Amino acid sequence: MAEHPAYPVGLRLTGRRVVVLGGGQVAQRRLPALVAAGADVTLVSPSATPSVEAMADTGEIAWERRRYADGDLEGAWYAVVATSDPEANAAASAEAERRRVWCVRSDDADAATAWTPATGRAGGVTVAVLTTEAKDRDPRHTAAIRDAVVEGLRDNTLVAPQHRTKTPGVALVGGGPGDPDLITVRGRRLLAEADVVIADRLGPRDLLDELPPHVEVIDAAKIPYGRYMAQEAINNALIEHAKQGKAVVRLKGGDPYVFGRGMEEAQALAEAGIACTVVPGISSSISVPAAAGIPVTHRGVAHEFTVLSGHVAPDDERSLVDWAATARLTGTLVILMGVDKIGRIAETLIAHGKAPDTPVALVQEGTTSAQRRVDATLATVGEVVRAEDVRPPAVIVIGPVVAVGAPTQKPQK
Ligand SMILES: C[S@@+](CC[C@H](N)C(=O)[O-])C[C@H]1O[C@@H](n2cnc3c(N)ncnc32)[C@H](O)[C@@H]1O
């Protein structure tokens, strides 16, 4: 038979019977996508890998614990033949041909009537890569092409202009702690689609340089706020740009809802009737200690971590933190916005019973090239901050986890 290229197509399998023969590694790789496509999957196999078994246990697939038998493909729209028995595979493949069921075979691509492409998703499209002819089949090469396209779409190095109209509105995007690689894929995509970006001083500022020239970038710290409070001025800027039909990204450091005033912005947008989507981000409270080699929990050392704001001193009437209760916690304390007040905070913790020699680490500008870690104890931290000239932004970690792991880890680049 002359070799013709395979005909690419997207199967819509929702509610349709799909039979998978064999519960090994091939099934483990194929089943999640079949389940995600809504297929009504039956696995026929005497055994299965633990992951496949877990899918059966949760009811995502039906599992018949036996070997393949003629007739198993009745009513199927699609079959994956991947048992370890070549004779069973050949028999199932013959049954598929007889019943006109499209069938992939893990052991013999030539005998299959369908091939599984290397697939990936980015920005609302599915990328599927197939070699043109069976003789050129090279799964590593197709996977590498898939990876290159998906990565390119995600980080915008592969430019594919969108012609559908963008949805106007505001995305509150958590940008992560500063390293541009630590924003989420969704956040990066929304940034690439934005008409206007209103950015904080903290977060992945390097990403702003990559935006195309037509994107208006506004520094939130520089929005003139006249008789408004700064936050109201930011809310108004978001509302006004969105009302002009623009796609607006509010790029925030860390996670929008961790001391980020994200909900205030979401509420203001809701009151103005503007669509708002929130994209979580990697909070500095966890990622900055990690970048400096400090785990916020560690087996046998800390079974809890508490994130606190140190922007007001413990004796300030505006403080909502119960410092006496905090001093009794045995786990890790992570303090944000606390550089100025750490001396008073440390004194208060000691006064309420925390050991003066409790280890403390201050991690300044974590995950950036300027990252620096300074170590102290509760008794010395007030003095050390001054002597070492530690400046915001810094995350302060208090507790025995500080002494676990590598003390001088630098950000990985
Ligand atoms: C207004 S809070 C915002 C927190 C942010 N929403 C988050 O989830 O990380 C700002 C504080 O976060 C901490 N912070 C944020 N990014 C940091 C970084 N790269 N290095 C050290 N501290 C950081 C500092 O304590 C800073 O004062």
Image (cartoon, grey):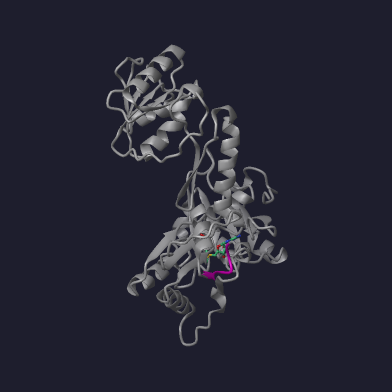
Residue 106's spot in the image, x, y percent?
A: 48, 24
Q: Is residue 199 magenta?
A: yes
Quick one: 357 or 310, which is closer to the camera? 310
| Span of residues in magenta | 197-203
Quick one: 173 or 110, which is closer to the camera? 110
Q: Which residue is found at the position 54% from the left and 35% from the top?
A: 132
| Location of residue 228 with respect to 117 vertically, above or below | below
In the picture, measured across the screen, residue 271 lies left or right of residue 124, that is left
Quick one: 325 or 286, which is closer to the camera? 286
Q: Which residue is found at the position 58% from the left and 51% from the top?
A: 152
Q: Is residue 382 magenta?
A: no
Residue 260's spot in the image, x, y percent?
A: 48, 65
Q: Which residue is found at the position 45% from the left and 24% from the top?
A: 112
Residue 274's spot in the image, x, y percent?
A: 36, 71
Residue 356 visible in the snapshot: no
In the picture, measured across the screen, residue 21 lies left or right of residue 206, that is left
| Location of residue 50 with respect to 259 vertically, above or below | above
Quick one: 368 or 350, which is closer to the camera? 368
Q: Quadrant of residue 356?
A: bottom right
In the picture, measured across the screen, residue 96 lies left or right of residue 393, that is left
- Please tell me in which quarter of the rendered image ligand 1 is found: bottom right
| Location of residue 146 with respect to 205 vertically, above or below | above
Residue 108's spot in the image, x, y percent?
A: 50, 21
